[in-house]
Amino acid sequence: MIRVRSLVAALSAILLIPAVAGCGSDGDDEPKNVSAKTAALGTITPGVIKVAVQPYAPYTSVQGDRIVGLDGDILAYAAKKLGLEVKPQVTDFAGMLAGVQSRRVDITIGGVAWSADRQKQGLFTDPPYYSPPAMAVRSGKTYKTVDDLKGLQLGTVEGYVWVKSIQAVPGAELHAYPDANGVFDDLGAGRVDVGFLDPLIIIAAQKERPELKIDTQYMTPPTAAQVKAKPAYEYFQPYQTGFYLPKKATKLEKAISAQIDAMYENGELEKLVGKYGGDPEQFLKPSADVATARRGVDRPQDWTPPSIAQ
């Protein structure tokens, strides 16, 4: 939901020099009358939260000095509650991660998937949503499980981890494209049966390109036995996203996580997911492996992932 990136991209982020501004005071742009509580959050500039972001609508887009989209709206809500002014700094995905890991920014957002490797280099908030395995299909066609994909023409974007999953499907043929438009073009033309992309991207394309005659379907995740037999199938499972912060930003992470948890409780997340066409039942209820992945890693052993009412 958001966006799943290859291992190569994740590792290169550690090495890439981030295309974001350096640390330090913003001088005249620094907010006045910052409360002691807000200053104690420890952002680079008191009262400001510097956000590395890559335009990736409808998750993140920069309009003027604002970040809009699902992730942008969630962060804006939390920042307002905490008395922080959001300042975006546009970069690429590798720069997003590297900017956090070098503490040139306070946070990055936009479909960043939690992983055990990434959490070693930074901090993840509680999940603002869970990204379900979504498929773009031609209208009238229905696919539910991995077995339904056998022998089909399957498309995704080059470098996305769905490449590995598709290659593991018996008889399926991979079609990899430079961007999502290529997937949609060939899907509409009948050259591809199913496209694997982040769900809100598919939903947006349905609205913006009705001539394609495509639908959004959610896959029933493969069983544990199927993943054990074919480990690449793990990328057909839901993944948990998170806002990503520098390793030392413990106070800020806890404060934002608390706001995210409150948004599950007060209905704000359901409203925002629905605003962008997502299904709250798919986006805001964790699968069983979310808790087990993080317990004893970057969360206590008794941690319960946030969820809307079951």
Image (cartoon, rainbow, N blue to C red):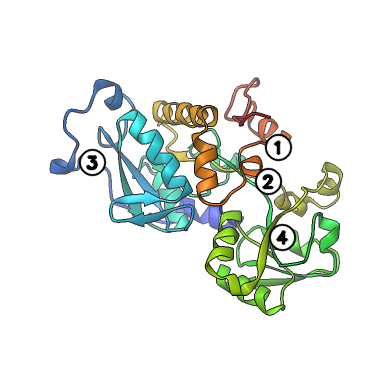
Q: Residues within 10 Å of mark 4 (few under 14, many from 20)?
A: some
Disc marking residue 238: 2
Pointer 3 residue? 24
Q: Position of residue 6 (x, y in %)?
A: 60, 57
- Mark 2 vs 3, N-terminal side: 3
Q: SS of the residue at dot 2?
A: loop
Instruction: Measure the C-alpha gap from mark 2 to mark 3.
Output: 38 Å
Q: Position of residue 113 (x, y in %)?
A: 57, 46
Which circle's residue, 1 or 2, is located before the other in the chain?
2
In depth, the one of 254 and 2 nearer the eye is 2
Select label 2 or label 3 by which is in front: 2
Tell me, for residue 287, which label it has, or none: 1
Judging by the rendered image, the residue that carries numbered circle 4 is 164
Instruction: Report which quarter residue 51 is drawn in.
Output: top left
User: Quick one: SS at disc 4?
Assistant: helix
**Mark 3: which amino acid?**
Gly
CA neighbours of label 2 inside 10 A, class few (<14), some (14 to 19), many (20+): many
Is residue 46 left or right of 68 when viewed as pictured? left
Furthest toward the left, the residue is 28
